Amino acid sequence: MIKGFIITLSIIAALFLVYCALPNLYARNLSKNVYHKLKPGNHQIALTFDDGPNAAYTNRVLDILKKYDVKATFFIVIKNANKNLSILHRMKEEGHEIGFHSYQHESAWELLPKKTLTEISRGEAALQAENVTFRYMRPPWGTFNLFTLYQAKKHGLKVVLWNIEAFDWRKNQTAKGIEQEVLSRVEDGSIIVLHDSGGAEGAPNRTIEALDGLIPALLDQGYQFVTLEEGL
Ligand SMILES: [Zn+2]
């Protein structure tokens, strides 16, 4: 009885190690095919927004980007995009890059191989009529399983994480806190992750408020905002 339990536990641990933990460690720390920063030397940085589009927030983010004539990259959730097609088209029309975040924001650790291997084609198929093509992907929470990188490569997508996160999704974060987090760590080539949807209740309100201070401050420091296409 106890022996059987230990064997089952060992099998689960081994599967977790091979399917989740080791691929995650490799992708996040060792793989040359996972980008955390832009090409250095050009004083360029990239703003990236995950989890939208969202009817309550994304247009307000787009308004601020427009106000400062700044381009960004949006890693979208297909299910959200389907509900907000006009916002998706606005992103495109205003020159922003659209990247693939996931179909419905499931962690790679929850996805079985078959679902992992069909995520991108499922997403592309869902948006086929909208003429959206993906060149970049960022898996939810930056999690990888054994097939995540393979899937991205098969579809010709570059995998992009970040080197600055402002924890804008946290319950107790503030707009000032977001600004300080970014301003204290920004450097040539930084890829900054923010969120235009999800997180704690109302969290993107603080992100939007922070952007209005953050963007002019970074422009004052001489940084040029680019999309991933321009900066990688
Ligand atoms: Zn996300």
Image: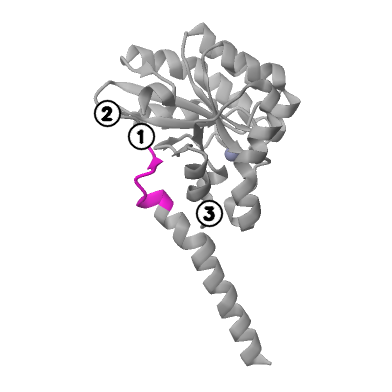
Numbered disc total: 3
SS class, disc 1: loop
- Mark closer to the chain start, 1 or 3: 1
The alpha-carbon separation of the residues under discs 2 and 3 comes to 30 Å
Magenta run includes residue 109: no
Residue that numbered label 3 is attached to: 147
Name which of mark 2 and mark 3 comes first in the sequence.
2
Q: Percent position (x, y) of residue 187? A: 31, 28
Say whether residue 66 is visible: yes
Look at the image and tell me in which quarter the C terminus lies: top left
Between the C-alphas of marks 1 and 3, the distance is: 23 Å
Badge 2 element:
loop
Circles 1 and 2 in contact, beta carbons < 8 Å: yes
Which numbered disc, 1 or 3, marks the residue closer to the eye? 3
Residue range of the region highlighted in magenta in the rendering: 27-37
Q: In which quarter of the view is residue 51 placed? A: top right
Q: Give the number of the disc on residue 37.
A: 1
Question: What residue lies at 65% left-to-right and 36% top-to-bottom?
Answer: 123
Residue identifier under label 2: 40
